[in-house]
Image (cartoon, grey):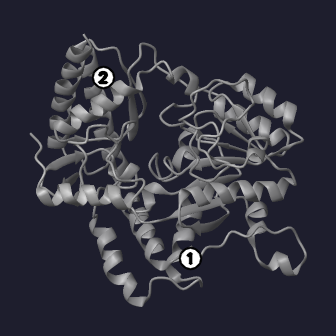
Amino acid sequence: MIERSDKERALIAEAERIFPTQTRCLTFDPDLNFCVGKSKGSHIWDVSGNEYIDYLLGSGPHILGHAHPAVLEALRTVPEAGTSHLIVNEHAVRLGQKIIEHVPCAEMVSLHSSGSEATFFAMRLARVHRKRDKILKFEGAYHGMNDYAMMSNQWTMGSPAFPKSVPNTHGIPRAISNEVLIAPFNDLETTAAIISQHHDELAGVIIEPIQRTFEPRPGFLQGVREVTANFDIPLIFDEVVTGFRSGLGGAQTLYGVTPDLCAIGKAISGGLPLGVLCGRRDIMEIANPKRRLQMLPYSMQTGTFSSNPVCASVALALIEELEKPGVYERLNEVGTRVRQGLRDAIADTGIEACVTGVPSVFEIWFCRDEPYDHRSSKASDFYKNIRFSDLLLQQGVLKAAEKFFISAVHTDEDIDETVKAFRVALGQLAEEIS
């Protein structure tokens, strides 16, 4: 039984008074809402001292767990030389070199403060390069909180005819809806037809190579690459989730498809504000301020805290840890065991559900047929997913209302306890809906 101290209840109440958002841990049950006290490795504790096995992992960044020694060492030593300068520093240079070494499309790199910035600037670069305005994205894909990205993402309820876009929040100028075209993920025929029809209007195509937890069908990414290359339309991979989580080369290496631009973030951020944009030299060069003096097309994409040495040094330290032998093997082993444990629990309890994704990030859907894109996923009962998350939290297992994020430091004991929690939570859920 989870108990809350008076101190924690007071902090939660004060957070709800002060902050309009980011006050809850993705639960509809106020008794389960908590305030973080500390985190270490694969576990997190609330202010009252309750301990949880963490599969939220800050929405994915902590691929090596919370408070990793390499991160703490970087945070301990680097700030002594200053935290932000608006001038290039050695840590940023070394990080850029590592990105270019590992990411297939990376010929040049720019550093930013979030994944939302990286995707936004990628789209801006594509517009300058192509001298066009429209961007094509895929229905259900999430590319951050910028206005162009907040169109037809995973919170889209309706099913308009493609390629019409739908805003996912109030406050987006109506004109932006006309600048974003929508295609169905994993449907190459429809996607190719939309691109072909609108190729002379398109500045770029942005895609999550693994959309949420939908793996691309064989040949889908290759087909998108082919049709965009045919019309010289920049292909942008949003690898904020998959970059360095799917391997040192990300999904580009996993699926053998090289985009023109790529946004990276979470897995090398250590939980700090970091976004990376990388790609073809001729496109990335558009952001060089010297072009302004040369009267050439130029895309401004600077920020006060971009390339700061603290975030850069943490990312560099994490990449060096990920380069060590056995790290990805352990990550995939843990993910495979947890994911299979979830599938076994589903089968044993008889509840109607399925699992999509890859070992390091996956998701449960409460529907009969395995979804493969946004519209097929709407057959799932999302409220059962939320209830399942609440029941897991009562068992000491924390996840988002959507994905399970896996770390390489989840232990065998964590896995065993998690699988037990799956069986209890799914059993309780089956009884509630029977």
**Who comes first in sequence, dot 2 or dot 1?**
1
Taking the spot 65% from the left edge, 35% from the top edge, the residue there is: 138
Disc 2 crowd rating (10 Å Cα; few below 14, some 14-19, many 20+) is some
Tag 2 residue: 343
Q: Amino acid at mark 1?
A: Val
Numbered disc 2: secondary structure: helix
Numbered disc 1: secondary structure: helix
Residue found at the very far bottom of the displayed protein: 81
Query: Which of the 4 image quadrants contains residue 285?
Result: bottom right
| CA separation in Å, label 2 and label 1 | 44 Å
Taking the spot 48% from the left edge, 18% from the top edge, the residue there is: 379
Taking the spot 42% from the left edge, 66% from the top edge, the residue there is: 272
Query: Which of the 4 image quadrants contains residue 256?
Result: top right
Q: How many marks?
A: 2
Residue 69 higher or lower than 161, as above or below? below
- What is the quadrant of the N terminus in the image? top left
Q: Is residue 430 left or right of residue 381?
A: left
Residue 264 higher or lower than 175, as above or below? below
**Of the pair 141 and 336, the residue shown nearer to us:** 141
Task: Look at the image and tell me whether residue 46 can be seen.
Answer: no
Expressed as whole percent of the image width and height from the top left, the position of residue 119 reads 63, 54
- What is the quadrant of the C terminus in the image? top left
- State if disc 1 and disc 2 touch (CB < 8 Å): no
Query: Closer to the observer: label 2 or label 1?
Result: 2
Expressed as whole percent of the image width and height from the top left, the position of residue 288 reads 75, 74
Mark carried by residue 372 = none
Tag 1 residue: 93
Residue found at the very far front of the displayed protein: 17
**Of the pair 208 and 70, the residue shown nearer to us:** 208
Residue 345 higher or lower than 396, as above or below? above
